[in-house]
Image (cartoon, helix red, strand yellow):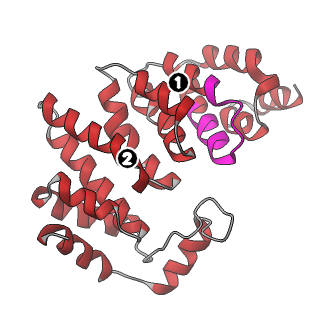
Amino acid sequence: MNAQSSRVEARMLSLKDEKQAKNLSRFFKTGPGQYGEGDLFLGIKVPQTRLVAKEEWRRCELSDVKELLRSKYHEIRLCALLILVKMYKHNAKDEAAKKAIVDFYIENTEGINNWDLVDLSCYEILGDWCLTHDRDILYSLAREGKTIWEQRIGIVSCMALLRKGETDDCFAIADILLAHSHDLIHKAVGWLLREAGKRDALALKDFLCARISDMPRTTLRYAIEKFPQEERLAFLKK
């Protein structure tokens, strides 16, 4: 590691909490055959990781982020992604710098290998980029992502679009992922559908009515969570 990435790593290691690490290992399903199998935790809370990222990002280059993303420790990879988000936002008016960060993000997804790492970074970077650029990458990730994490990036990145009131891509990408077999994709799709419904309730109900026979129960439950009880029960009976 170079000096700056080593500095960030050392700060993170100094915050290690073995008791909390055991709790996080269970929470993020790191046992044999589970989705986070083999991942290692330091036991650092997210606000602590955010503070390190806030204080260190200005000294970092993409090469530092790349080294940190290769860490065996989950929280150090999260810190790398939070640093990358800071870098992206700092360059809000520099298209070339933003593109370099987006390209870097897509090229280094092997380090983005759990749901929190996806959810705390993708819409802030890739989703924001897609507000003003081609969105084909979101569809490609959903259809052809090499891992469930890349596929989750495809749908969760739509949060940036939803926050601007744009729902069409969210419904289209949700449709691509309805047949997916993994529960973490079912949850993500349901979550984003629920968020789309906050912007356009009628469009959500139309989507549910059209696709309910193909929809995993978990996705449906997440999508209708904010519906009135009577309406929620009616959808569940379908």
User: Residue at position x 43%, y 20% from top?
Assistant: 165
The span shown in magenta is 175-192
Binning the other alpha carbons within 10 Å of mark 2 as few (below 14), some (14 to 19) or many (20 upward) gives many
Where residue 205 appears, as percent x and y from the top left, is: 69, 18
- On screen, residue 226 versus residue 65, left or right, reads right
Precedes in sequence: disc 1 or disc 2: 2
Determine the image quadrant of residue 125: top left
Q: Can residue 211 be seen in this view?
A: yes
Q: Where is residue 140 in the image (x, y as percent from the top left)?
A: 48, 27
* Residue type pointed to by label 2: Ser
Q: Is residue 179 magenta?
A: yes
Q: In which quarter of the image is the N terminus?
A: bottom left
- Residue at (49% x, 20% y) in the render: 169
Considering every residue shown, the one lying at the far bottom of the view is 18
- 196 falls in the magenta region: no
Residue carrying label 1: 170
Q: Is residue 132 above or below residue 5?
A: above
Compared to residue 134, the image places residue 74 above or below, namely below
Say left or right for 20 vs 53: right
Instruction: Please give the label number shown on residue 121.
Output: 2
Badge 1 amino acid: Cys
**For the residue labelled by badge 2, is the local secondary structure a helix, a strand or a loop?**
loop
Residue drawn at x 20%, y 68% as measured from the top left: 5
| Dominant secondary structure of the residues highlighted in magenta in the image | helix
